[in-house]
């Protein structure tokens, strides 16, 4: 049954989200790492064992930087429910993600979050929501990460009479600029196969959207079968960058941006191509079987030159 959308932009943009907090443990970080494909193929001597196991007497496991993207979910325990925005949640797609990392993520942490709806845009055939989540380590008060999450609501546009976007004027737009893919050969290419069960494992990290698990919902949303979470694909891409460019040092990642260009089906092979650019890496991820680009973006690194 179709669900109609109804928007009151002023009401939505003036909504104040309550501050929230949550705790995570090593178990959450390890489950997340498995959800984005760590240790899938060469677990025994993999440099990724540190994400799931305390190896070599190391006291704590290491946490993948993309784990911070989950803080958007953790900061909104009621989901994307906002006064003034009624839409069909089955048609929601993740459009973009931008993550800034201020310090390595602890393996256990109590995190305080501040979240706001930072932007609302009318694209006629769709509405775009932009959320900003700032997350702080409770113990030290230190800022851990800033996430900017773009949600693409198909069929929910046309709520505005003006072409001017409804958004806060102080919101830094274009945090996720569409990257220009260089024409020369990539510096590095990494291929990784997702498992048919990938989305079912990934969802246990907190995104229980049935688009990724329920065949009927997937059909209503226009897909032949449940699709992979966008953030799972992003996790695979950033793991590729950590392996190929950062020599396995996840703490070199300073910021991550990505635009989801096309859906991925669990079980498909992801090929991530990387080009060095400025202080970071331009990347794009393709599905090998369909030869289609599904994600592209830029990852800013700490100390790129010294690592190569
Ligand atoms: C942690 C918090 C998580 C947040 C919630 C996420 C919950 C998850 O469970 C949901 C998911 O993971 S869904 C899976 C991942 N996402 C996808 O698979 C989407 C892939 N992308 C698409 O299908 C198309 O790009 C599509 C459909 C998105 C757009 O394609 P078109 O309709 O053809 O758009 P187009 O005509 O090219 O452009 C229209 C205007 O929209 C802008 N735009 C396009 N793609 C965008 C994208 N990916 N993100 C943001 N904006 C986007 C265009 O710029 C254009 O605007 P303008 O006219 O102003 O240029």
Image (cartoon, rainbow, N blue to C red):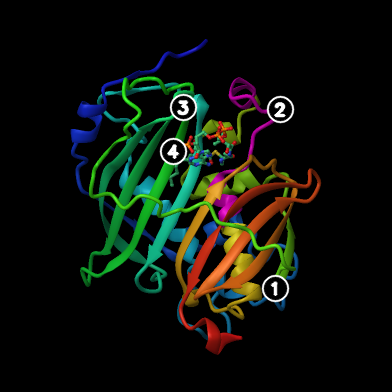
Precedes in sequence: disc 2 or disc 3: 3
Residue 151: give its label.
Answer: 4
Mark 3 C-beta closer than 8 Å to ligand 1 = yes
Is the residue 163 above or below the residue 43 in the image? above
> Where residue 111 appears, x then y in whole percent?
29, 60
Look at the numbered disc 3 and give the secondary structure of its residue.
Answer: strand
Label 4 packing within 10 angstroms: few (<14), some (14-19), many (20+):
some
Q: Nearer the viewer, mark 2 or mark 3?
A: 3
Q: Could you tell me residue 259's position as x and y percent?
A: 53, 49
Q: Which residue is mark 2?
A: 224
Q: Is residue 16 left or right of residue 174?
A: left
User: Looking at the image, which residue is at 60% across and 66% down?
Assistant: 239
Badge 2 or badge 4: first in the primary sequence? 4
Tell which of 185 and 106 is nearer to you: 185
**Residue beneath disc 1:** 187
Read off the residue under disc 3.
126
Q: Identify the residue at image location x=38%, y=71%.
A: 106
Between label 2 and label 4, give the one nearer the viewer: 4
Query: Magenta segment, which residues?
Result: 216-234
Helix, strand or loop at label 2? It is: loop
For label 4, the SS is strand
Find out whether the residues at labels 4 and 1 contact each other: C-beta distance under 8 Å.
no
Verify CB contact (< 8 Å) between mark 4 and mark 3: no
Q: Position of residue 258 (x, y in %)?
A: 52, 54
Between 299 and 182, the one nearer to me in the picture: 182
- Asked if residue 123 lies left or right of residue 295, the reply is left
Classify mark 1: helix, strand or loop: loop
What's the distance in space between the residues labelled 3 and 1, CA to CA?
36 Å
* Count of numbered circles on the image: 4
C-alpha span from label 2 to label 3: 21 Å
């Amino acid at each position: 049954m179709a669900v109609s959308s109804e928007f009151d932009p002023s009401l939505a943009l003036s909504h104040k989200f309550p501050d929230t907090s949550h705790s995570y443990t090593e178990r959450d970080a390890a489950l997340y790492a498995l959800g984005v494909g760590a240790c899938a193929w060469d677990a025994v001597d993999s440099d990724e064992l540190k994400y799931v196991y305390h190896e070599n007497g190391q006291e704590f496991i290491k946490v993948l930087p993309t784990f911070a993207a989950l803080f958007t979910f953790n900061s909104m325990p009621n989901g994307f429910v906002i006064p003034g925005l009624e839409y069909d949640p089955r048609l929601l797609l993740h459009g973009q993600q931008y993550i800034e990392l201020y310090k390595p993520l602890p393996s256990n942490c109590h995190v305080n979050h501040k979240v706001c709806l930072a932007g609302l845009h009318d694209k006629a055939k769709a509405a775009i929501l932009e959320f900003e989540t700032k997350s702080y380590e409770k113990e030290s008060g230190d800022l851990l990460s800033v996430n900017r999450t773009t949600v693409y609501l198909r069929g929910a546009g046309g709520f505005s009479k003006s072409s001017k976007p409804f958004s806060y004027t102080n919101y830094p737009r274009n945090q996720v600029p569409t990257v220009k893919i260089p024409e020369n050969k990539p510096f590095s290419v990494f291929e990784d196969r997702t498992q048919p069960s990938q989305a079912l494992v990934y969802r246990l990290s907190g995104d229980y959207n049935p688009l990724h698990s329920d065949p009927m919902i997937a059909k209503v949303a226009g897909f032949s079968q449940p699709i992979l979470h966008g953030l799972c694909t992003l996790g695979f891409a950033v793991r590729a960058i950590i392996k190929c460019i950062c020599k396995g040092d996840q703490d070199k990642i300073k910021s991550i941006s990505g635009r989801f260009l096309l859906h991925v089906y669990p079980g498909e092979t992801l090929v991530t191509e990387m080009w060095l650019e400025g202080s970071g890496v331009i990347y794009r991820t393709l599905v090998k079987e369909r030869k289609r680009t599904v994600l592209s973006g830029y990852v800013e690194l700490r100390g790129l030159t010294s690592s190569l």
